[in-house]
Image (spheres, rainbow, N blue to C red):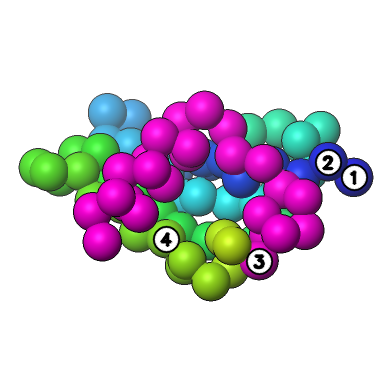
């Protein structure tokens, strides 16, 4: 099973927010997931990104990979600390 750490969209039309989830890459974007490991709210100024760092690192050690967008959010979040 190839796992990815990616975004899943939530919220109403025009008011999106996203969960950062670990999922099998074969599932649809807003479909099943294994675990929620963070959130991203682009509507706030500045945008708010939260990660459960320990859980993300554990999934990375198990072979999960970031999507390009989540990789960018992770780099900004880790660089800010």
Which quadrant: the C terminus?
A: bottom left
Instruction: Say if the magenta span includes residue 33.
Output: no
Q: Secondary structure at mark 2?
A: loop
Q: Secondary structure at mark 3?
A: helix
- Work out which residue is located at the far right of the displayed protein and give it: 1
Q: Is residue 66 left or right of residue 14?
A: right
Front one among 8 and 3? 3
Task: Kindly report the distance in space between the C-alpha atoms of the residues bearing marks 1 and 4.
Answer: 23 Å
Residue identifier under label 1: 1
Q: Secondary structure at mark 4?
A: strand
Q: Do the numbered discs 1 and 3 sit on residues whose CB atoms are within 8 Å? A: no
What number is the disc on residue 2? 2
Instruction: Say if the magenta span includes residue 65.
Output: yes
Residue 28 locus on image (x, y percent): 71, 32
Sequence-earlier tag: 4 or 2: 2
Q: Secondary structure at mark 1?
A: loop
The magenta region covers 58-81
Residue 59 locus on image (x, y percent): 68, 59
Residue identifier under label 4: 51
The crowding category of the residue bearing disc 2, from other C-alpha atoms within 10 Å (few below 14, some 14 to 19, many at least 20), is few
The crowding category of the residue bearing disc 1, from other C-alpha atoms within 10 Å (few below 14, some 14 to 19, many at least 20), is few
Q: In front of the other: label 2 or label 3?
A: 3
Residue identifier under label 3: 58
Task: Kindly report the distance in space between the C-alpha atoms of the residues bearing marks 2 and 3.
Answer: 15 Å
Q: Do the numbered discs 2 and 1 sit on residues whose CB atoms are within 8 Å? A: yes
């Amino acid at each position: 099973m190839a796992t990815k750490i990616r975004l899943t969209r939530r919220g109403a039309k025009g008011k999106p927010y996203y969960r950062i989830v670990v999922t099998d890459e074969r599932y649809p974007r807003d479909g099943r997931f294994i675990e929620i490991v963070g959130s991203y709210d682009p509507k706030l100024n500045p945008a708010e990104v939260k990660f459960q760092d320990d859980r993300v690192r554990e999934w990375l050690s198990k072979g999960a990979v970031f999507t390009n967008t989540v990789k960018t959010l992770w780099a900004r979040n880790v660089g800010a600390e």
